[in-house]
């Protein structure tokens, strides 16, 4: 019968994160008996803050205790900060990237990452085609991916295996399906384009071969650049060779701007309601995890920022112990938050 297994050697299943490197989302049964599953999760104030209030930042790191966060808008923010999970984030003096774009996307870890694309708030918010690589000490390799955009989907565990899809180009007022992969030195076609012209989607990822894209803005029918996009109430899954539409009408609509987790299971926060949605089957079904805790000074709404597991204000990758960093108060432009919020299951 389902849900008969509650403990292994007196340890509850919710306390066991992996078996031989696999999460309970990857393991359906043990001796024919299914998992009880994880709780919906709760939000809390970490008690830590960014040094600088940031919106539409990029951020990356393996866990929420080893994060690098950078740039942002509505005015240009040039600095980067480190977050170690146990104190306020700290500005890395003298280590600014040469680009201060908003809504960039990034992949990798605190000491090995690449950031790409974005918009220049000092130049009429023009979408950019610029990338930089970080080795933990300095920035290098100002290269171009091949197209101007901001807020694409992005995923990658290091600077040598990073892919971006879609995005919005302000110069043409279009969203696109373009996919490009970075191998550490050059960009090339990703081989598989985005499922539709899409931008500002939340993306949870194990790697650039296992990616969930949720909501955002897109054109349902177009297979090339489109200027007639609307809110996406959909979830897509990429398995390394193709995209599939896993569900519709279950995940809310509009821009996500924040996501964290793995490509198979991830936590998602978006919209002014600050709701959290969880999935354990590559995006086929969802359950609501509730709203942001009160008393955080953010009008009961989750702050939002740039897109994606590899490029938003998400904090860490795990849907068990993820979170969000910075963003706009109440999902409205102009008042940037310093708050670091935790999400635990």
Image (cartoon, helix red, strand yellow):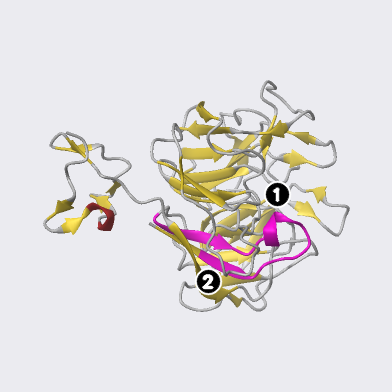
In the figure, is residue 199 to the left or right of 26?
right
Q: Is residue 92 visible?
A: yes
Q: Say if 311 sits above or below 89 in the image.
A: above
Q: Which residue is mark 1?
A: 117
Q: Is residue 182 visible?
A: no
Closer to the camera in the image, 206 or 315: 315
Residue 179 occupies quadrant: top right
Closer to the camera in the image, 3 or 14: 3
Say which residue appears at 38% left-offset and 56% top-offset: 345
Q: Position of residue 275 (x, y in %)?
A: 55, 50
- State yes or no: residue 133 in magenta: no
Q: Tell whether label 2 touches label 1 (CB within 8 Å).
A: no
In the figure, is residue 240 to the left or right of 333?
left
Q: Which residue is mark 2?
A: 83
Few, some or many residues within 10 Å of mark 1 (<14, 14–19, 20+):
many
Magenta-colored span: 320-341
Image quadrant in which the N terminus is located: top left
Spatial separation of the CA atoms under disc 1 and disc 2:
23 Å
Q: Position of residue 201 (x, y in %)?
A: 62, 42
Of the residues under marks 1 and 2, which one precedes in the sequence?
2
Say which residue appears at 75% left-offset and 65% top-offset: 335
Farthest residue to the right: give it.
Answer: 124
- State yes or no: residue 337 in magenta: yes
Q: Position of residue 291 (x, y in %)?
A: 53, 54
């Amino acid at each position: 019968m389902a849900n008969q297994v509650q403990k292994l050697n007196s340890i509850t299943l919710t306390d066991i994160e992996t078996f031989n490197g696999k999460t309970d989302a990857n393991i359906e049964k043990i001796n024919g008996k299914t998992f009880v599953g994880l709780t919906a999760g709760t939000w809390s104030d970490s008690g830590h803050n960014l040094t600088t209030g940031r919106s539409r930042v990029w951020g990356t790191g393996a866990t929420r205790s080893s994060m690098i966060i950078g740039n942002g808008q509505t005015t240009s923010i040039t600095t980067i900060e480190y977050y170690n999970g146990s104190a306020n984030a700290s500005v890395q003096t003298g280590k600014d990237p040469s680009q201060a774009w908003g809504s960039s996307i990034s992949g990798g870890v605190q000491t090995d990452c690449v950031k790409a694309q974005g918009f220049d708030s000092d130049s009429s918010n023009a979408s950019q085609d610029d990338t930089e690589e970080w080795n933990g000490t300095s920035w290098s390799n100002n290269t171009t991916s091949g197209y101007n955009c901001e807020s694409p989907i992005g995923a990658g565990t290091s600077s040598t295996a990073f892919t971006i899809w879609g995005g919005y180009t302000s110069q043409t007022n279009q969203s696109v399906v373009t996919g490009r992969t970075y191998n550490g030195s050059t960009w090339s076609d990703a081989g598989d384009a985005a499922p539709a012209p899409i931008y500002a989607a939340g993306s949870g990822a194990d790697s650039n071969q296992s990616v969930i894209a949720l909501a955002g803005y897109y054109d349902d029918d177009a297979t090339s650049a489109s200027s007639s996009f609307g809110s996406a109430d959909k979830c897509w899954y990429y398995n390394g060779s193709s995209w599939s539409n896993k569900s519709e009408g279950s995940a809310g609509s509009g821009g996500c701007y924040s996501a964290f987790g793995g490509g198979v299971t991830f936590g998602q926060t978006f919209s002014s309601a600050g709701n959290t949605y969880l999935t354990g089957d590559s995006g086929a079904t969802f359950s609501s995890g509730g709203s942001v805790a009160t008393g955080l000074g953010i009008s009961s709404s989750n702050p939002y920022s740039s897109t994606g597991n590899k490029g938003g204000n998400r904090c860490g990758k795990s849907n068990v112990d993820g979170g969000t960093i910075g963003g706009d108060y109440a999902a409205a432009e102009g008042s940037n938050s310093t708050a670091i919020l935790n999400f635990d299951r």
